[in-house]
Amino acid sequence: MKEIMTGGVGEVAVGEGLVSMTLVRKEIRPTDEPEVVHELFLPPNGFLHLYSQLENLVGKMMEDGMLRRETEGEGDA
């Protein structure tokens, strides 16, 4: 299996019966535009399964203290 390293998700869209996500590489300088490195296409039921898995993972990460919810106003620059 080929592993893919990405800096984040650029855009998520739906069209022609598929959910598409662009996976991007982010450069160190904030002026650099993220570079699309891969595109991921999922049928709606596959996307729903991914969403459920991510939701469970976020809950676990919050329990473990790896993440916390931002309060209103946090993260605004």
Image (tube, rainbow, N blue to C red):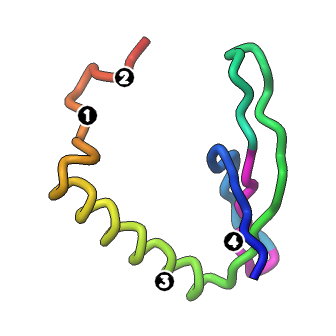
Contact between marks 3 and 1 (CB within 8 A): the answer is no
- Residue wearing tag 2: 75
Within 10 Å of disc 4 (Cα), the crowding (few <14, some 14-19, many 20+) is some
How much space separates mark 2 and mark 1, taking CA atoms? 7 Å
Residue under the point 77% across and 70% down: 15
Within 10 Å of disc 3 (Cα), the crowding (few <14, some 14-19, many 20+) is few
Find residue 54 and report its image quarter.
bottom left
Apparent side of residue 13 relative to residue 46 in the rendered image (left or right): right
How much space separates mark 4 and mark 1, taking CA atoms? 27 Å
Label 4 or label 2, whichever lies nearer to me, is 2
Within 10 Å of disc 1 (Cα), the crowding (few <14, some 14-19, many 20+) is few
Label 4 or label 1, whichever lies nearer to me, is 1
Callout 1: SS = loop
- Residue wearing tag 1: 70
- Residue wearing tag 3: 49
Residue 19 shows which numbered tag? 4
Residue under the point 32% across and 60% down: 58
How much space separates mark 4 and mark 3, taking CA atoms? 12 Å
* Sooner in the amino-acid sequence: mark 4 or mark 2: 4
Apparent side of residue 43 relative to residue 70 in the rendered image (left or right): right
Apparent side of residue 49 relative to residue 74 in the rendered image (left or right): right
* Sooner in the amino-acid sequence: mark 2 or mark 1: 1
Type of amino acid at the residue the image marks with label 2: Gly
- The magenta span reads 16-24
Contact between marks 4 and 1 (CB within 8 A): the answer is no
For the C terminus, the image quarter is: top left
Find residue 40 and report its image quarter.
bottom right
Q: Judge whether 29 appears above or below 19 on screen.
A: above
Q: Position of residue 57 (x, y in %)?
A: 34, 67
Type of amino acid at the residue the image marks with label 3: His
Q: Position of residue 51 (x, y in %)?
A: 46, 72
